Amino acid sequence: MFTGIIEEIGIIRKIQRGQVSGKLTIGAYKVLSDAKVGDSIAVNGICLTVTSLVPDGFTVDVMHETFDRSNVGSFRVGTKVNLERAMAADGRFGGHIVAGHIDDTGTIEKRWKDENAVWYEIKAPAHVMRYLVEKGSIAIDGVSLTVAKVEKDRFYVSVIPHTEDMTIMSEKRAGDRVNLENDCIGKYVEKLLGLCSDAVAGTAERVTGADRKRNGTDKKGNVTEKLLAENGFLL
């Protein structure tokens, strides 16, 4: 698990591409202080496993799915990337829960300064937008940011100078693709609510005739509080 607080900017040193997968060598310093083979490091928000260590960096394997879901295919030798080690158990939770599993990419439509802040307008696909709420969280290239405004097919974030300085956000321009990861809480809540709804509907369908009053549905077969309570949906 990560928190979206970037530790260091790394540099792509080498790219080896197969037909659908690949291997990256990433130059770094700070994240190597306690790194070992098998550790997870978020690269632009993508959770990748360290496969080997070199004096000034590390290597990772990149799967077909990662190329499909993220902007890793646009990496070139010399590309700068955000790096974050997995959160230590005794660390501070400075951002939000970031799994490192990219939902999709978005496109920066506009970027402009507002005194000491920089605003970004980012267009995103519908399955990303459905989980975004104003003042909620989003990870953009692994950076934990607050959603300032939400529209039908786009959202806005405002970035402080410190975040610009410590990440690759300062290099982003209109037209650039960025990795997006939704706050996972919304997805879990949606799934659980769907399961509850399906279970209640299935129970209601099995209730007929004289069983309605006993099992908590009214004459029209509508679900009542009694039915919900007996099936564990109410305390």
Image (cartoon, rainbow, N blue to C red):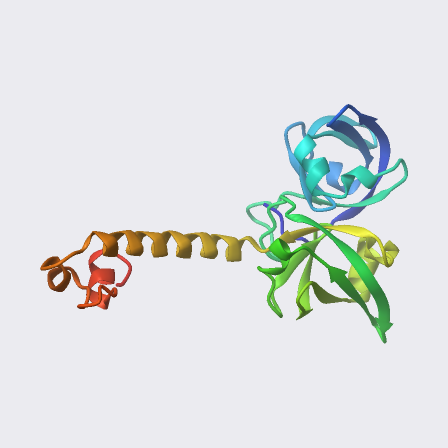
For this rendering, which residue is in front, 196 or 213? Answer: 213
Q: Estimate the x, y position of residue 16 in percent, counting from the top left.
A: 82, 26
Q: Is residue 172 visible?
A: yes
Residue under the image location 38 percent in, 51 percent down: 195
For this rendering, which residue is in front, 233 or 3? Answer: 233
Q: Estimate the x, y position of residue 202 in percent, counting from the top left.
A: 28, 51
Of the 4 image quadrants, the one containing the C terminus is bottom left
Residue under the image location 63 percent in, 57 percent down: 126
Residue under the image location 68 percent in, 52 percent down: 180
Which picture quadrant has residue 205? Answer: bottom left
Please state if 185 lies on the left or on the right of 77 as rendered: left
Image mark count: 0
Extreme-left residue of the structure:
210
Which picture quadrant has residue 100? Answer: top right
Q: Estimate the x, y position of residue 229 in percent, counting from the top left.
A: 22, 61
Residue under the image location 56 percent in, 49 percent down: 90
* 116 w.r.t. 21: above or below: below
For this rendering, which residue is in front, 235 or 228? Answer: 228
Q: Estimate the x, y position of residue 214 in percent, counting from the top left.
A: 11, 61
* 219 w.r.t. 70: above or below: below
Extreme-bottom residue of the structure:
115
For this rendering, which residue is in front, 203 or 177? Answer: 203
Of the 4 image quadrants, the one containing the N terminus is top right
Please state if 209 lies on the left or on the right of 188 as rendered: left
Q: Is residue 28 visible?
A: no
